[in-house]
Amino acid sequence: MLTEYEINLSACVDVIKESLIKILLSSLILLTPLILYAIFSPKVYSSSIIVAPVDEVQGGGLSAISSQLGSIASLTGLSLGSQSNEIQLAIETMKSKKFISSVVDKYKLKPFVMAAKNFSYETGIAYDSSVFNDADLTWKRDVDFPLSPEPNDVEVWEEFLKLFKIENDEDAGLVKITFNTISPYFSEKLPQIFIDEINDYMRKEKVAEAKQSIVYLSEQLEKTDVPEMEKVFYQLIEEQMKNSMLAEVRKEYVFKIIDPSYEPYKYNLKSKIILVVVGLLFSFFLVTFYFLFINRSKLILNK
């Protein structure tokens, strides 16, 4: 015959009160490695840049006539997407392997992303000598096949994603990009680099797309003898030419800087505090559960 049990809550409280000092001391002992990690781990510096989407990213006129030409444009294979779609595309592009790899290669960031160990104002960046030798610029990683001593693009991309976050406030129409690195210099420069590069990347994409559209529309124009359709094609070609010319001359094509990044003079202590507080709560509940478990005979009553 099975016996039913119930927990005596007042007994639980009594056990916790009786063992409170032991629980606190045990929690602190469990927390010690985490505290040591927080103390001796590299300082992290944070810097943010705030940007706003440039008005009429699509080029102005094309979005203005989208209600009139939407059905025709869709038939010809053109996209009259909204500005919000363009901004979301830019944000997702900034997270992509292709874009991040191009930035890392252009600015030679691979050693910093994969091997930077510490930073001081006196000596600069210190690299992990078991990973990268900054004296002769060689990679020293001891890894198994198919990996090689020099990290590949996927490895770099995975590590780079940990350095930044993007916050898109659609209500305010602002985008905030924050970099957290061990170097105040890189924390300041990387947000600006990202905005410059995404503007340039999206501008080149738009120019190439517009030129392809002009060629396609011109071919379709030659195939039609309907005056109304000819007028529509001429309008679409004109708008694509405007798009191309505007993209060529506008440096801030997708994002306009509202508040530039700065070189932080204080490291980010908040993340370490959160780590310790979360660790303290976890260890406290874990130890409390342990003391309740070893005193379970006092807590369970036969029903």
Image: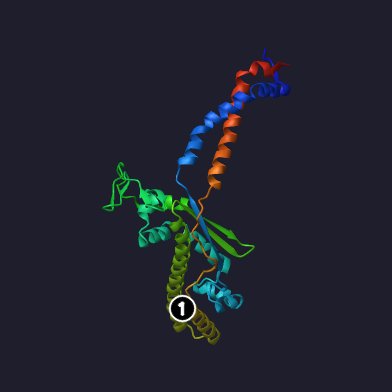
Q: Is residue 185 left or right of residue 145?
A: right
Element under disc 1: helix
Visible residue check, residue 82? no
Residue 287, image quadrant: top right
Q: How many marks?
A: 1
Residue nearer the viewer, 164 or 232: 164
What percent of the width, then of the height, locates residue 257?
53, 68
Residue nearer the viewer, 237 or 5: 5
Figure check: 235 above or below 99: below
Q: Read off the residue under disc 1.
A: 249
Task: Tell me the residue at 41%/59% (across/down).
Answer: 98
Residue 144, image quadrant: top left
What percent of the width, then of the height, locates residue 222?
44, 84
Judging from the image, the colouring scheme is: rainbow
What percent of the width, then of the height, locates residue 240?
49, 78
Residue lying furthest left:
136
